[in-house]
Amino acid sequence: MSPRTLASQIKNHAYNIGIDLVGITAATLNPHYDFFEQWIHKGYGATMDWLTKNHEKRKDPKNILKEAKSIISCGLNYYSGQPLSVDCDDAKRGWISNYAW
């Protein structure tokens, strides 16, 4: 099976189970890592401490999984169509973020 055929099968399966976006790329060095590292050192991550933990692993996928050849990224649209929490004027009701619906 050719890599292109396998990628198409993976994407089609993902779409069939409800994934909205699918991308596949080679597991190579992150071309934006230097920018990311400067961004972190300038403190732009604010309270997102998880970004700074082991951030050097983000430079190369093989720092996490030595045998990695490809990376499959998936995205889900979390817009639910539910009313926005900020539109609720009932003080007894809590706000629920779209991603939590």
Image: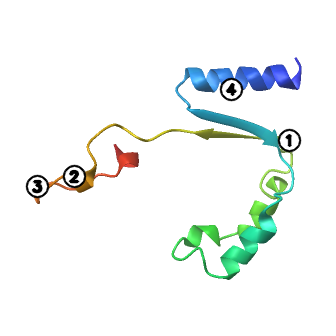
Whole-number angstrom distance, CA of label 3 to CA of label 2? 9 Å
Q: Which of marks 2 and 1 is nearer the N terminus?
A: 1
Whole-number angstrom distance, CA of label 3 to CA of label 4? 43 Å
Of circles 3 and 2, which is in front?
Answer: 2
Whole-number angstrom distance, CA of label 4 to CA of label 1? 17 Å
Whole-number angstrom distance, CA of label 4 to CA of label 2? 37 Å
Mark 1: which amino acid?
A: Lys
Whole-number angstrom distance, CA of label 1 to CA of label 3? 52 Å
Q: Is residue 22 above or below residue 41?
A: above
Mark 3: which amino acid?
A: Asp
Specify the quadrant that holds the N terminus.
Answer: top right
For mark 4, give the secondary structure.
helix
Q: Which of marks 1 and 3 is nearer the N terminus?
A: 1
Of circles 3 and 4, which is in front?
Answer: 3
Mark 4: which amino acid?
A: Lys
Residue identified by numbered label 4: 11
Q: How crowded is mark 1: few (under 14 residues within 10 Å), some or many (20 or more)?
A: few
**Where is residue 27 drawn, in percent x and y?**
83, 47
Whole-number angstrom distance, CA of label 2 to CA of label 1? 46 Å
Residue identified by numbered label 3: 90
Residue identified by numbered label 1: 69
Of circles 2 and 1, which is in front?
Answer: 2
Q: Which of marks 4 and 1 is nearer the N terminus?
A: 4
